[in-house]
Amino acid sequence: MDAERLWWEAATAVEVELETEVVEEAYEVHVAEVARARLADRVGPARLRLRSGVFVEGDVVADEAIEGHLRVQLASDEVAVVPLAGLIALRGTRPRLRREDVRDGSGTLSSWLRRCRLAGLRMRVCTVDGLSWSGTLSTVGADHVGLVDESGECWLICIASVECWVAPHAAT
């Protein structure tokens, strides 16, 4: 064998070994990232199935995400906020990169509900029994909201029973 051929064979062997190491390392990183992935880290067009059997369709958006919830931009120019606890399954979306260094407290359900209340927005609240309640928020408690319906009656709705909050796009 000539020296040039030996050189090319050695270089090829080293290159294949490096490629194998890079692929193995990339696979390990991928597996670790998939293991950390949460439904709340997904964005894009989706169809969500809730516990009550109701479907919600729209674009899952990540900006100003509400912790423990998915925010879905509906075709009706409304926003649905779906607690992960009320979600059975979803189809569509893609993973997104998330910033883990940002937690200013503005991404809570309570703060979003208070903004809706202050703006006087008319909301729809879908509960686990399949009912849909409409009105404006009068109060936001620790575990409930006061919702004033069209007749002026105020219903106290348990937050744990809510599968989906729907508000005008202005609520975002």
Image (tube, rainbow, N blue to C red):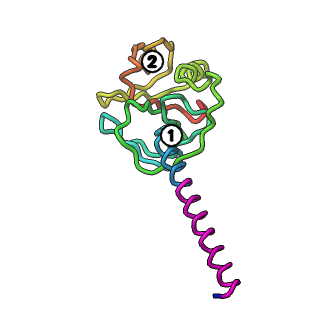
Residue extending furthest toward the bottom? 1
Task: Look at the image and give the residue range highlighted in magenta.
Answer: 2-25
Amino acid identity at mark 2: Leu
Characterize the local packing of mark 2: few (<14), some (14-19) or many (20 or more) Cα atoms within 10 angstroms.
Answer: many
Q: CA distance from mark 1 to mark 2?
A: 21 Å
User: Is 159 one of the magenta-colored residues?
Assistant: no
Q: Which mark is residue 48?
A: none
Residue 150's x, y, as percent? 44, 21
Quadrant that contains the C terminus: top right
Relative vertical location of residue 155 with respect to residue 37 in this rendering, above or below: above
Q: Which residue is mark 1?
A: 72
Front residue (pair 105, 72): 105
1 or 2: tag closer to the N-terminus: 1
Q: Position of residue 20 (x, y in %)?
A: 55, 63
At 50% from the left edge and 37% from the top edge, which residue is drawn? Answer: 40
Residue 79, above or below 156: below
Residue found 48% across the figure and 45% down from its top: 34
Give the number of marks: 2
Discs 1, 2 touching: Cβ within 8 Å: no
Q: Amino acid at mark 1?
A: Val
Compare residues 78 and 82 and report the one nearer the observer. Answer: 82
The residue nearer to you, when weighing 127 against 50, is 50
* Predominant secondary structure, magenta span: helix
Residue behind mark 2: 147
Q: Is residue 11 left or right of residue 41?
A: right
Q: Residue, x 55% and y 25% (percent of image)?
A: 121
The N terminus appears in which quarter of the rendering?
bottom right
Of the residues tagged 1 and 2, which is closer to the observer? Answer: 1
Q: Is residue 75 above or below residue 85?
A: below
Residue 43 position, x and y percent, is 53, 45
Please state the horizontal and vertical placement of residue 41, each as a whole percent of the image.
52, 40
